[in-house]
Image: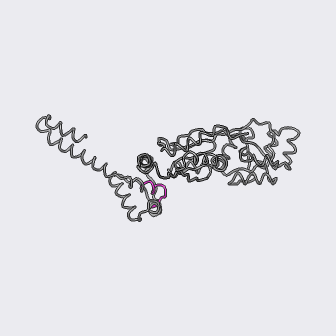
Amino acid sequence: MLTALLKTRRAHLPVGSNHWLKSFVGFIDAQVAFMLHLTLRQFEIFCAVAQSGTTVAAAETVALSQSATSAALQQLEGGLGVQLFERVGKRLVLNDAGRALLPQALAVLEQARGIEQAFSAKAANMPVRLRVAASTTIGTYALPEVLARLAASHPLVRVDLQIANTQEVGEAVLAMEVDMGLIEGSSHWQGLEVEPWLRDELVIVASPRDPLAQQAKTKPLGVAALRKAAWLLREPGSGTREMVEHALLPHLHQLPAAATLGSSEAIARCVEQGLGISCLSRVLVQSQLQAQVLDILPTTLPRMWRNFSLVQRAGKRRSPALQAFVDACGASVQPITD
């Protein structure tokens, strides 16, 4: 359009300016032609190399040969006129230009997928597969009800569920490895939109045989007793670990871990065996509380809560299938507490 407009103006310019205009129109034509030669495949390969660090690994991701992957990357760099990676040993690491391009390339690919999903003539009558990542407690205890509700309302929507800790879920959403994430606690990532979902209570639990449980029968445990306790904690990066520290450290000022475990269920089992105490989600230990193999320790601390949240890349447009999943989550209006 810009080229056509310039050409229509050519006749109205003074004699002598025609040569300049031809040059300028030629330049614009070249830029338009270059822009049209940028392909989604090049962006896909660029993002794959950025995430994997090698053209060999990226080639496997995009189902191309290593030589074709390298050639596409070189074409992209040649077209843009900038180098996007620096070689560090055997790895390719994004430079400043590459870091600037990556979020834009990811956004372009996301929009293309959205267009493909929304306007495919077959999409309405074919199964749609969503990729969702959830932190351990959410994936184990909160999502089964959501998935059942979604299956009933949208039987053609399938969900591939990845369960990890909150840190790993956030990174997967940022890298566009999943369509949506569900996390415990706070989000620390720029470029993610956070939507609060449910409220969850954290409780301090011990085996009924634990000396602290016996002591708590006479009066609530104070700060001094809790500081001396053998705490069993989740690993760093876990949403539960972060929220437990956020809730307890202002009062206890220290929280040394007698042991660190990568599973909240494993911690609950160890507490049940009298190996220490812990602060866990009430929904996670509810069955053990009912079976009276765990006790909630009365303390002088205030009640502790945390949020479960939905996270997605900023600016991401939700497909009809993804919106159906969010709606199924929204039907869980009751907090996950007693």
Name which residue lies at 67% across and 43% down.
Answer: 243
Name which residue lies at 42% across and 55% down.
Answer: 46
Image location (x, y in percent) of residue 189: 54, 44
Magenta-highlighted residues: 46-54
Left or right: residue 315 versus residue 6 is right
Task: Name the image quarter holding the C terminus.
Answer: top right
Left or right: residue 301 versus residue 217 is left
Image location (x, y in percent) of residue 284: 71, 47
Q: How many marks?
A: 0
Whether the magenta-drawn stretch holds residue 18 is answered as no
Whether the magenta-drawn stretch holds residue 50 is answered as yes
Magenta: main secondary structure equals: helix
* Colour pattern: one colour
314 and 31: which one is in front? 314
Name which residue lies at 75% across and 46% down.
Answer: 286
Quarter assignment of residue 12:
top left
